[in-house]
Image: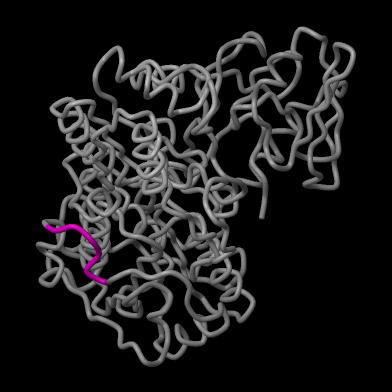
Amino acid sequence: MGSLSPAIHPSLTLQANGYHLVSFPGVFRSVLSSRRTRPDMTAVCERGRCVVYAEKKSNEAIDYCDPEWKSKFKKDFEKRFNIPHISDFFPDAVSYPSTFCLSMRTPVNEEFAEGYPSDEEWYGYINNDDRVLLKVIRYFSPSSAGAECIDPDCTWVEQWIHRAGPREKIYFKPEDVKAAIVTCGGLCPGLNDVIRQIVITLEIYGVKKIVGIPFGYRGFGKEIAEMPLSREIVQNAHLTGGSLLGVSRGGPSVHEIVDSMGDRNINMLFVLGGNGTHAGANAIHKECIKRGLKVAVVGVPKTIDNDILLMDKTFGFDTAVEEAQRAINAAYIEAHSAYRGIGIVPFELHGPHGVLSHLKYLLETKGSAVICVAEGAGQNFLEKTNAKDASGNVVLGDIGVHIQQEVKKYFKDMGDPADVKYIDPTYMIRACRANASDGILCTVLGQNAVHGAFAGYSGITVGICNTHYVYIPITEVISYPKIVDQNSRMWHRCLTSTGQPDFL
């Protein structure tokens, strides 16, 4: 998997093309040491100077003393973000006039009574050379808030990625297409919205054979039958939460999945899921190429955590935040209404800078408190099992229950019991239907996923970057986890909003 350019990561890391060392004056030491670097970066500060080592990514390292380094960096960036196309692997691939027309709700074909629409009616296609600027801020100094610099001088270098949308030429005949949709991982608001729009857009292109793969990648097993899909079936799917196809983690091997796709004659696969699911989709894409199968594999990022690299946001996030607010407000009202009430919505618990001592202070000064605990927090307090789910993710213990028990015990031992209410909003957040904002996002993502597949792209994902819809190679969005910069204004706004103590 490729790694992302340092210019698109919120750390002062400089070089991603080779084992390259850059020296900084001491003024940058506090900036570097106070931020988390990428997993493939090593920052070392000594005697007022900092250096950054980057993981080798290509055979050619950029020399910043070279007057042509900017053009070399651009070429490397363009190479990494060049989206795979059917014609790259099948030179004899044939293109056809698109059957998608913006002025019609039905597919255009040679038998169309009125003939093909005029040139004016074709207006609206995306040129293959259209690009979207990934970043729009030119930083003057590495010490600027949120600076994302490529070199020590913070030189401005444009970084362009592929614009999403319908193309004038397509590489699949609709009558020859059998498209499959699969939803993997956990539930997320908007899954049905995306499924619905993919089906509708496929039918607009003229595709007749559309199926859903039930229960994630497991649905490729022989014992599970595929689910026929049509506009009639999915018409009202967006009115409910969950996934009409079902979800699961794990599944057969990549070889077995591609075998199943071959047996079912599937040549378009739309995969809805997070980082792990996308890694699987990329493996499927590579295996299809290896076997000489002309298959388009397109991902649609799905996570309520909004932690997909490069994306402005992912579908389901707005809805999840909206629903989480309801749980937090309920906890606040419950805690505020009770005598010495404490509401917990799933650090150190004990000691002078622990949560318990701060809770004591809040009850003495305000009379109530609400604790919001991130999923996966405080695992060091729980018994480790090393258990993993079917996707290979570590199974996290329930820290909320542990905190509830510890809080009750703490105040009981003090002789002044507290009324503790525990609210776990996890499934309330994941299983609800998408709100209007996410519904619109899902619609456009679903449409662009189909446009990308018909345009002949594979091994890509669709998302929104810098407010525009784009296609990105899957390898570039699964390189490493997206992290929160603890020195950012966003994190400061979070602290200001929650009122949590500075020592946490």
Out of 125 and 149, give the one closest to the viewer: 149
Where residue 25 appears, as percent x and y from the top left, is: 82, 10
Q: Which residues are magenta?
A: 240-245
In this rendering, the answer to whether 124 lies above or below 415 is below
Quadrant for the N terminus in the image: bottom right
Whether residue 269 appears in magenta in the rendering, the answer is no
Coloring scheme of the render? Answer: one colour
The one nearer the camera, 221 or 389, is 389
Q: Is residue 154 toward the left or the right of residue 345 in the image?
A: right
Q: Is residue 277 above or below residue 416?
A: below
Q: How many marks?
A: 0
Q: Residue furthest front?
A: 415
Residue 394 location, x and y as percent? 54, 59
Residue drawn at (74%, 28%) of the image: 14
Whether residue 122 appears in this view of the structure is no
Q: Is residue 241 magenta?
A: yes
Between 306 and 269, the residue placed more toward the observer is 306
Q: Is residue 405 visible?
A: yes
Mainly helix, strand or loop, the magenta region? loop
- In this image, 223 relative to 151: left or right? left
Q: Quadrant of residue 451?
A: bottom left
Judge left or right: residue 332 versus residue 98. Answer: left
The image shows residue 475 at horizontal and vertical percentages of 59, 54
Q: Position of residue 148 (x, y in %)?
A: 62, 23
* Residue 101 picture quarter: bottom left
